[in-house]
Image (cartoon, rainbow, N blue to C red):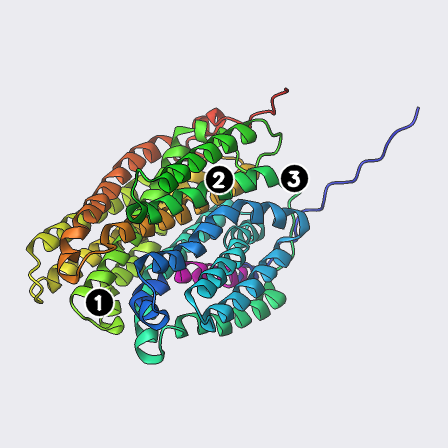
């Protein structure tokens, strides 16, 4: 009788010192800040880009969404690849790709070249966000410390998204629109050096197989959906091209669901969505980022096109949003770690909904003067407050109650939902204002403000689900954890 030797499991990672662990978090958070910043930093510069490259609103939407669509489509695969070949290695590769793509954006001679370079930026960014989170989780085995780190993580991402328009406005005003891409280069160089010095290499104990059919179907579904939303108003919703795009989106989505249900190691564990708390949190992530991107794009176009504001002035108008996110994001992390996600989600819901209502009132009263500016500033402060409070509890709600080997997948799905929300928000906002005259932008924006208000109110549903499903650091809620469904087995045939 012979026996076959099996490879021993990899040894547990060495315990890092507290200073080293938090240094790893700082390096990874720096990369996350880049990912979030580049999602919104371009918004304020869109009018300047359109003028410089002589393109209209549709092309400007693609300049933004080519980044977010690629990022949303590749996040989960990038995480699986990092588990196989090494997280630090993939993280550093993502930084290099992101830096080179930023150079391509800064030097782009045409709109098509800029769209292509932005898509390549999305490829690099997809190797940063989920991979860096896995590095942080691996470096912090203590559950309480890990919960605090996730709170900081979500806070940094919220801050980067809110700071993008302010930073972009200042850069465009001082150095031109290409500077919003040049600024990435020194940050990438610093992040690469710091990762070499401080970030340890790690891999998953058992790496998942790459799901290439699922990845192809996910790209097709996301791209077709966003393309229809962007081009539908121009082509006509009943035109053959629009109907064909809808058919591709539906077929790709159905094919993706079918393919994932029959794979032993799917790209996206659809069994997680049988857990109502998780599914609600994912929809909440989409809603938050739809509200953010709709608000930013509609405000940018109205201030610069209808009012003639400079990019710097438009960026300053969004400064209250950045301030609200800066103050409330870390506070949200503290509240989640102490009492769970429900309270910050309630703050996020009412703040976002109130901001949307104020902007709707402003659009109804706007006469082209400056009397409505205080209303705009208060609304942006409320939206920033809502955005700051929302990210940490949504992440906590999504991964709470799941075992460690599934928390990474849940986090990657939530990150994908955020980027999908950004892409959909840009497409919807662009469709509302495309072709509108400067005088008609306020009226054209009203459905957008209704959508922002609805997204805020939906967070009340997320808060209700979070109250039932949260599992504290002390182990409370273990019954919900035990009830969480495991991954479905592959079906035969």
Figure check: 35 above or below 171: above
Q: Residue furthest bottom?
A: 174
Element at label 2: helix
Q: CA distance from mark 2 to mark 1?
A: 39 Å
Left-right relation of 141 to 437: right
Pick whichever of labels 2 and 1 is earlier in the sequence.
Answer: 1
Q: Which mark is in front, 2 or 1?
A: 1
Where residue 339 sits, quadrant-wise, is: top left
Number of the label disc, if any, that sits on residue 120? none
Left-right relation of 325 to 445: right
Can residue 163 be seen in this snapshot?
A: no
Quadrant of the snapshot with the C terminus: top right
Residue 282: give x, y in percent of width and height.
Answer: 39, 39
> Looking at this view, is 254 or 271 the one in front?
254
> Looking at this view, is 27 or 50 the one in front?
50
**Residue carrying label 1:** 304
C-beta proximity under 8 Å, tags 2 and 1: no
Q: What residue is shown at x 32% (from left), y 80% (from top)?
A: 174
Pick whichever of labels 3 and 1 is earlier in the sequence.
Answer: 3
**Residue carrying label 2:** 410
Q: What residue is shown at x 14% (from left), y 56% (from top)?
A: 440
Where residue 414 sits, quadrant-wise, is: top left
């Amino acid at each position: 009788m012979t026996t076959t030797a099996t490879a021993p499991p990899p040894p547990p990672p060495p315990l890092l010192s507290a200073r080293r662990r938090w240094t790893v978090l700082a390096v990874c958070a720096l990369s996350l800040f880049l990912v979030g910043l580049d999602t919104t930093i371009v918004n304020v510069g869109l009018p300047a880009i359109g003028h410089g490259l002589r393109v209209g609103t549709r092309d400007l939407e693609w300049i933004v969404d080519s980044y977010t669509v690629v990022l949303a489509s590749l996040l989960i695969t990038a995480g699986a690849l990092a588990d196989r070949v090494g997280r630090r290695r993939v993280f550093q590769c993502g930084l290099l790709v992101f830096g080179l793509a930023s150079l391509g954006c800064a030097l782009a001679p045409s709109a098509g070249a800029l769209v292509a370079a932005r898509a390549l930026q999305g490829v690099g960014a997809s190797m940063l966000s989920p991979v860096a989170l896995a590095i942080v989780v691996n470096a912090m085995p203590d559950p309480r410390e890990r919960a605090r780190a996730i709170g900081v993580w979500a806070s940094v991402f919220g801050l980067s998204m809110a700071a993008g328009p302010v930073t972009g406005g200042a850069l465009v005003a001082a150095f031109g629109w290409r500077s919003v891409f040049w600024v990435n280069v020194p940050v990438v160089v610093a992040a690469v050096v710091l990762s070499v010095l401080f970030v340890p290499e790690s891999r998953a104990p058992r790496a998942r197989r790459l799901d290439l059919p699922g990845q192809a179907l996910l790209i097709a579904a996301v791209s077709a959906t966003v393309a229809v939303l962007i081009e539908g108003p121009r082509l006509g919703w009943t035109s053959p091209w629009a109907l064909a795009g809808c058919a591709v989106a539906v077929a790709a989505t159905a094919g993706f669901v079918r393919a994932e249900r029959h794979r032993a190691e799917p790209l996206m564990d659809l069994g997680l969505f049988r857990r109502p708390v998780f599914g609600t949190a994912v929809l909440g992530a989409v809603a938050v980022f739809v509200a953010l991107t709709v608000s930013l794009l509609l405000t940018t176009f109205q201030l610069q096109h209808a009012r003639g504001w400079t990019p710097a002035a438009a960026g300053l108008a969004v400064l209250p949003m950045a301030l609200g996110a800066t103050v409330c994001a870390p506070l949200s992390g503290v509240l989640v770690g102490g009492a769970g996600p429900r309270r910050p989600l309630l703050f996020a819901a009412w703040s976002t909904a109130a901001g949307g209502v104020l902007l709707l009132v402003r659009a109804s009263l706007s006469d082209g003067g400056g009397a409505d500016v205080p209303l705009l500033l208060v609304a942006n402060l409320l939206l920033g407050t809502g955005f700051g409070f929302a990210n940490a509890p949504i992440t906590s709600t999504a991964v709470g109650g799941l075992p460690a080997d599934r928390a990474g997948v849940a986090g990657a799905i939530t990150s994908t939902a955020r980027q999908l929300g950004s892409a959909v928000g840009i497409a919807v906002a662009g469709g509302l204002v495309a072709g509108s005259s400067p005088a008609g932008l306020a009226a054209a924006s009203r459905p957008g403000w209704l959508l922002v208000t609805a997204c805020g109110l939906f967070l009340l549903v997320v808060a209700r689900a979070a109250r039932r499903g949260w599992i504290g650091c002390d182990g409370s809620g273990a019954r919900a954890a035990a009830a969480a469904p495991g991954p479905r087995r592959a079906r035969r045939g």
